[in-house]
Amino acid sequence: MADYDIVIKDGLIFDGTRIPRYRGDIAVKNGLIAEIGRIPANAGRRAIDAGGLHVAPGFVDLHTHYDAQLFWDPYCSLSSWHGITSVVIGNCGFGFAPVKPELRERAMLSMTRVEAIPYAAMKAGLPWDWVSFSEFLDSVERAPKAINILPYMPVGPLLIWAMGLEAAKAGRRPTAAQEREMCRLLDQAMDAGACGWSAQRLMPTGPSSVQMDYDATPMVTDVMHDETCEAFARVLGRRNQGFMQMTISSGSYQRDWAHMERLADLSGRPLLWNVVQVYDHKPEVHRESLAWLEDCRRRGLRVYGQGLTTDAGFTFTFEDWNLWDDKPAWREATVGSVAERLAKLADPARRRALRAQDPRTVTGPMADIAVIGPKSPETQRFLDMTLGHVAQATGKHIVDAMLDIAVADGLRTEFFAAPPNVRTDYLAEVVANPWVLFGVSDGGAHTKFLTAGRYPTETLVRLVREHNLLSLEEAHWRLAALPAMVAGFEGRGVLRRGAPADIAIYDYERLAVRPSEIAHDLPGGEWRRVQRATGYRYVLVNGQVTIEDDRETATHSGRLLRHGGAPAGLRLAAE
């Protein structure tokens, strides 16, 4: 009789702790790693031949927005396709609980612009069998999952619940009673299994307001008060539990940093700051960020940065594009239905303001944007030209050159904006900091623009194999053990006896990110952009094979990880 469920034979093991790689076998039983060493193949009911393959802890993604998608996609793709076995949802302060029934529609609409999740998909795919946060977690637990889910308590719904939508939108200071109620709800959410809280705090106007609500008003977290965040930090400190995620920019790094330092000091808990960003034309941005993180480390503040290490650009059309909200004229022109957008962008009276606010901050210079998908005979001649070249060829201002093409195509023209971080030498400076996490996948969000969920595969291929910016041992620590430690994933992120068997087994030389494609696989008839991977021979989640030869096995062994702990029932029989 077999002693184990699975024996993984003769793999090159990277255990996530940064010790040197070694060749060995891993036995899996009851969802856990039972033994590591030399184990006969016939000791397991199934043997996996890992000869010539790398065996590593499954990757951990701390920045996703799968709060809706998990209900119709058990694999939370793209993440699971790229070796990710655990994710955190509820980032940036955005989520669907607690939400009163009469505000459910508003909650879905609020995710259509700030995170670009299609309304039709949410409308068709969300079960809405909850009101409170604990009821939401119960619903997540009931949903089939091929990946582990750890939930933040997003603070946006707390503000709306306690203060009312109008007051929260107006940025009013909560009363003492309202603040107590929000802290009570946060305590309640932590009791139910939340891993901490999250907030996005961008300027409601100006150069940092890159994402707004669907009606171009600020998100409630953008206008919340510092004192409210401090009250939430004190809750974690009193509980000695959880961590915080903060996307923040008030227009002053020094002010933002001082605020986050205070939150880390008040709570004594880890704070994850998004995002350490490389701009090829402004290297001082990431260098100042790295210097601040190092200063926090020296002073004993548990502040970590999440680095945008992927080079995924944006593929977009003006049917959906909304990432120039930092420019008021563009924000106003891209609000409304497709017909309303078309009328606005075609209006000569608006063009002067749009020309005056050439958007550059998120995607780099407009001149570098490429026309990759013209949709009519009139625009075909611009295929694969940059807008700079189109402007030269047509003698038009670059804004008019772009919008004339978009309008001629009924806003269906596909444009590609390259990322602002293509310089490898600058990226190497971020990668060299051992306390910067990789990622910012935004999984489940910006589904028609972005495929950054590929970042683990891209890390191993681009940063390690192609550019040798770090060792595989370091890469696996940064992709698994470090984020697991920051987020409080109990026992995950490493390969050791007794740990949950979340394991990625891949062919290093064949590992690749596949080309972008469009998938019509969302509820409500909606579509998204995806990028699959090549080279993942097996992915195990809680001891069961969920991916084999880069394809799903329809195995839903993922768990809701309340408090980050191993789910009930995953125990070694011998213990």
Image: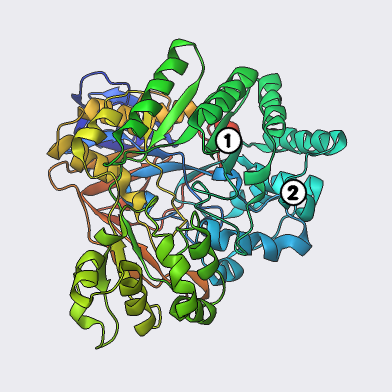
Compared to 207, does 307 lie above or below? above
Mark with earlier residue (1, 2):
2
Residue under label 2, please give it.
Answer: 168
Q: Nearer the viewer, residue 22 or 468?
A: 468
Q: Residue at x 64, y 45 (%)?
A: 221
Please name the amino acid that badge 2 sits on. Answer: Ala
User: Dividing the picture into quarters, in which one does residue 231 lie?
Assistant: top right
Q: Quadrant of residue 399?
A: bottom left
Up/down of 546 relative to 72, above or below: above
Check disc 1 and report its element: helix, strand or loop.
loop
Q: Nearer the viewer, residue 367 or 540?
A: 367
Q: Mark 1 highlights which residue?
A: 568
Tag 1: residue type?
Ala
Q: Is residue 260 above or below residue 161?
A: above
In the drawing, does residue 98 fall left or right of residue 330? right
Q: Position of residue 21 (x, y in %)?
A: 20, 24
Q: Is residue 573 visible?
A: no
Q: Residues within 10 Å of mark 2 (few under 14, many from 20)?
A: many
For the N terminus, the quadrant is: top left
Q: Where residue 363 is drawn, which disc sits there?
A: none
Q: How far across and how far down the image is residue 133, in percent? A: 70, 46
Residue at 28% x, 57% y is 532
Numbered disc total: 2
- Taking the spot 24% from the left edge, 88% from the top edge, the residue there is 377
- Front label number (1 vs 2): 2
Residue 134 location, x and y as percent?
71, 44
Please tell me in which quadrant of the rendered image residue 401 appears: bottom left
